[in-house]
Image (cartoon, grey):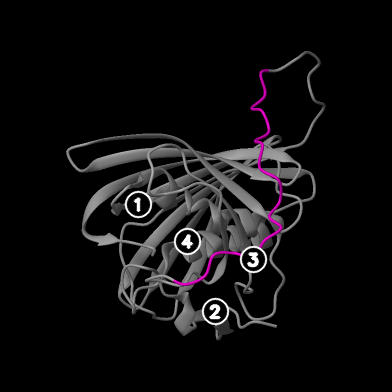
């Protein structure tokens, strides 16, 4: 089995070297904070009859590869809605936070809805992309040419456990993948000039299987501030959406 991103030691999560992000060799990847937040909410506040409807992850401080602590707090626990907050910190202070909304399952209303259509991308049959300035610690299949204008599409699959040898749950898996909405929606033909400050994942259902498809469906920016949106898929169809905000970054990340 491939090594995990974190090892749990005395209430802390100690990152492995491959937990770094693409911007700096000693900077913790922000997507892992979303994964830790999702895992903590699911373990501490999840129930079989509650669906994970929303996860907002604020990434307001870069962090070196230091041990991380994750704390949750139950904000609201009603008959149909449960809300939890997450605080993520190192010994340098708070580096991120998250909020989650869980909704109780019920009977689906009758009538025809204007559902988002499934995309026309079959599951990958070829090996994933490898090589580049930063080798992602997950499998990545590019479905579009990022050197050309137009919406970008990818398939992703995690190859490492998040913590020790604990299996990834569907909710944690999609929380990790959702951070990719930022480079997918904010990259241009010259590379990625924006780094995201947050992302909000909303789900109609959790994914089936290991593959997560991400499809950029919008980008707006002005004065160095950007917002982007993506639709998320699994092999069976669309599962949710992700919205990100981002700020222009002096460094430009080029994946190849």
Q: Which mark is residue 127?
A: 3
Q: CA distance from mark 1 to mark 2?
A: 22 Å
Q: Are marks 2 and 4 in contact (CB under 8 Å)?
A: no
Depth check: give the residue in front, 107 or 163. Answer: 163
Q: Which mark is residue 6?
A: 2
Q: Residues within 10 Å of mark 2 (few under 14, many from 20)?
A: many
At a point 67% along the width and 61% down the height, the residue shown is 126
**Helix, strand or loop at disc 4?**
helix
Q: Residues within 10 Å of mark 4 (few under 14, many from 20)?
A: many
Answer yes or no: is residue 77 visible.
no
Q: Which mark is residue 31?
A: 4
At a point 51% along the width and 80% down the height, the residue shown is 12
**Helix, strand or loop at disc 1?**
strand
Q: Residue furthest top?
A: 111
Position of the N terminus by quadrant: bottom right
> Residue 170 location, x and y as percent?
70, 56
Q: CA distance from mark 1 to mark 3?
A: 29 Å
- Chain-order first, disc 1 or disc 2: 2
Q: Which mark is residue 196?
A: 1
Answer yes or no: is residue 29 visible.
yes
At a point 35% along the width and 52% down the height, the residue shown is 196
Depth check: give the residue in front, 220 or 196. Answer: 220
**Helix, strand or loop at disc 2?**
strand
**Helix, strand or loop at disc 3?**
loop
> Residue 141 location, x and y as percent?
58, 57
Q: Residue furthest bottom?
A: 9
Q: Is residue 205 magenta?
A: no
Q: CA distance from mark 3 to mark 2?
A: 26 Å
Q: Is residue 120 magenta?
A: yes
Q: Which stretch is magenta? A: 114-131
């Amino acid at each position: 089995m491939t090594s995990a991103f974190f090892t749990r030691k005395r209430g802390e999560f100690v990152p492995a070297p491959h937990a770094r992000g693409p911007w700096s060799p000693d900077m913790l990847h922000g997507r892992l904070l979303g994964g830790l937040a999702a895992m903590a909410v699911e373990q501490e506040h999840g129930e079989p009859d509650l669906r994970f409807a929303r996860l907002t992850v604020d990434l307001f401080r870069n962090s070196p590869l230091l041990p991380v602590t994750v704390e949750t707090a139950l904000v609201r626990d009603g008959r149909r809605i449960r809300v939890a907050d997450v605080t993520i910190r190192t010994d340098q202070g708070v580096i991120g936070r998250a909020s989650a909304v869980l909704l109780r399952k019920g009977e689906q209303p009758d009538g025809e809805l204007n559902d988002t259509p499934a995309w026309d991308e079959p599951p990958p049959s070829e090996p994933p992309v490898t090589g580049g300035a930063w080798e992602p610690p997950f499998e990545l299949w590019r479905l579009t040419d990022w050197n050309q204008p137009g919406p970008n599409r990818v398939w992703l699959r995690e190859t490492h456990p998040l913590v020790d040898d604990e299996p990834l749950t569907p909710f944690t898996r999609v929380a990790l993948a959702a951070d990719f909405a930022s480079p997918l929606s904010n990259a241009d033909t010259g590379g990625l000039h924006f780094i995201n400050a947050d992302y909000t994942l909303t789900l109609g259902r959790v994914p089936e299987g290991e593959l997560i498809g991400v499809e950029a469906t919008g980008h707006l920016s002005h004065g160095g501030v950007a917002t982007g949106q993506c639709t998320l898929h699994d092999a069976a169809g669309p599962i949710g959406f992700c919205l990100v905000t981002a700020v222009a970054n002096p460094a430009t990340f080029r994946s190849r």
